[in-house]
Amino acid sequence: MDSGKKVSNGSTKSTVIPRATIFILLIIVLACLFIVDILTGSVDLGFKDLLRSLAGKGDTATLTVIRDFRLPRALTALLAGMALSVSGLQMQTVFRNPLAGPYVLGISSGASLGVAILILGLSSFISVNVAIIMNSWALVIAAWLGAGLVLVLIMIVSVRVRDIMTVLILGIMFASAVSAIVSIMQYFSNESLLKSFVIWTMGSLGNLSWKQLFVLSISVLAGLLISVITIKMLNALLLGEDYARSLGLKVRSARLLIFISTSIMAGSVTAFCGPLAFIGIAVPHITRLIFASSSHNYLVPGTMICGSIALLASDIISQIPGGGRVLPVNSVTALIGIPVLVWIIIKRNKFIRLS
Amino acid sequence: MKSEPEIISVDKVLIGYDPGTVKEKILLPAISVGAAKGEMVSLIGPNGIGKSTLLRTIAGMQRPLGGEVRFSGRNVSAYSNNELARKISFVLTGSMVVSNISVFELVSLGRFPHTNWIGHLTRNDRYSIEEAVASVGLLPHMYDNVGQLSDGEKQRAMIARALAQDTEIIMLDEPTAFLDLPNRYELIYLLRELSVTKNKTVVFSTHDIHIALREADRIWLATGNGIQEGCPEDLALSGAFDSLFEESDLSFVQDEGVFVSPVRTRMTIKLEGEGLLLYWTERALNRLGIKARSDAVTPSVSIEASEGVAAWKYESSVVTKQFGDIFSLVNYMKSVLKGDN
């Protein structure tokens, strides 16, 4: 045996931080950020205010701020972060591509199309108050329908096509075609409608009512539940579809199940919060670095927590301007996330391998 | 003979692509081969003849265009995905793409067909994994990342994964392709070991014909005319290997069991000597196109060994020369061939 010749790294197991400890640390960070997120916003709140409100002793104004604005926003960030990051992880594994993300199937383009038809199309004919639409169920449903349309196309393709790369390329083609239609609509729409649409594309976490939050939670939890079921399949897919098949995985059904999970999560988040970019691509990579593993036993729960942390942090930072002004979340995730990733790449001198 | 069905029986199978379309392409005439339990079978043949396609077809990853493949007498298409994964494991060609998981995690993927919906590893599963890692000699690297392993170790880890799958048949497509020479031998010996000690049926394709001829119980020999099977020795005696590289000049030397590129005979000599010295001297001279013939008289090369020191003597009608090693003899013979002397 030549195993003795190589410098053995058999001791690495004991020198690495145990993964249970990593999970506990991440959960503590998550809890802290959640509280900080509730405390930040246009009205200054202290930790004491929060405690008093929880005890039911605070003044009604503070209570209202926390109950109707801060808590829904923080919960939205929590759920959306989880959903997008897990979707991104699933897509990166299924497509074996480090640049894949939750929107690689064209879900955000589909949602954009739905919203564009609603805001830019319908509103041009019927005179309605766009401001009302922006916070309405109509917007959510339009986005859902658009995402669903693209999803059905992808499903049809993925069941018929054996090669996953073909599915990826067709997905990108669909997304581009849909974006082109949206561009045409933007070109012909008037300025105020266009601005409303552009604001939607910038993403927002703070527009959800409790009812909407309830629907979002149900969708995200359903998607996460499926993603837990797919852990074993994702691990088998790490070695590629041929190996997965030889291990007895029904590759096309697995693909379909994973796509459904991703679509439910990414579709719902996009419907309620707009297309939140970057989180879904970056967080899985960061999680791989933290856990130094490609095993989905760690990565699926790990990306859930890291995704929430990332989006809560972005939301807190987006509140920095103060005085009721809020930066677009999309810009914050990119501006904060990119330096972090670049720093990691330079420090490690390489992007951690996808699998 | 046929009391119990063979573990692998390939019955008039046609392999190829795009069945039922105008592009349908059948690679080889109908193939009928088999393998018995605990046998080590080596599939050899020139590039592009369809070795990978045949292995994939047998493993049920691709449909045959005709005929049928049976495992233990049962048609492969009658097996469910999971049953098939408990019957045959596959190690694909190419280097491994995964690097960021430990050997343990990689090998545990082999338990996929045996574990529950979430992939929970029972004590039994863990035992299988450990046993698989131990039998490929990677126990010291159990918790190392696969990316830190050498190429030979990576390939052994992939074999451990197949072992953990706990199948009667292990199929490997070009398992030695990316390895250096010692690792190639080690890997083939490992496969031999598995077939003997664990009674696994090991089927592998390879370009290392010389190792295969020595170690395989059975050869599936793929040539343009179809696939012949037999034990390596029978095939060698029947002259089957001559057809292997029909398009090249390579020929199979039956009494040595090796393939050689033919050299034009440029000179015949008388060669005297014995044992190893004679063997290696003849090889060196053959390389130059100098053939030894028993009826030749001159020129002559004689090898004399006394007290462990060998000397080579070249005699022709005009000169007599002495050499202390084969290298200087060969250099001199080159000048003789050029006509300098």
Image (cartoon, rainbow, N blue to C red):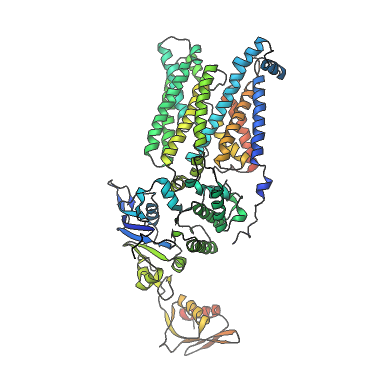
- The location of residue B245, given as percent across then percent down, is 37, 65
Q: Residue at x 66, y 23 (%)?
A: A35
- The location of residue A312, given as percent across then percent down, is 62, 26
- The location of residue B123, given as percent across then percent down, is 56, 48
- The location of residue B212, given as percent across then percent down, is 45, 65
Give the answer, above or below, for where A264 lies relative to A231: above
Q: Nearer the viewer, residue A329 or A30?
A: A30
Name the image quarter holding the N terminus of chain A. bottom right
Q: Is residue B130 visible?
A: yes
Q: Is residue A191 visible?
A: no
Q: Nearer the viewer, residue A53 or B310?
A: A53
Give the answer, above or below, for where B212 lies relative to A269: below
Q: Nearer the viewer, residue A242 or B126?
A: B126
Is residue B173 shown left or right of residue A20?
left
Name the image quarter holding the C terminus of chain A. top right
Which image quadrant for residue B39? Answer: bottom left
Q: Residue at x 41, y 46 (%)?
A: B81
Q: Nearer the viewer, residue A58 or A148?
A: A58
Q: Residue at x 47, y 28 (%)?
A: A264
- All told, the count of numbered labels is 0
Which image quadrant for residue A282? Answer: top right
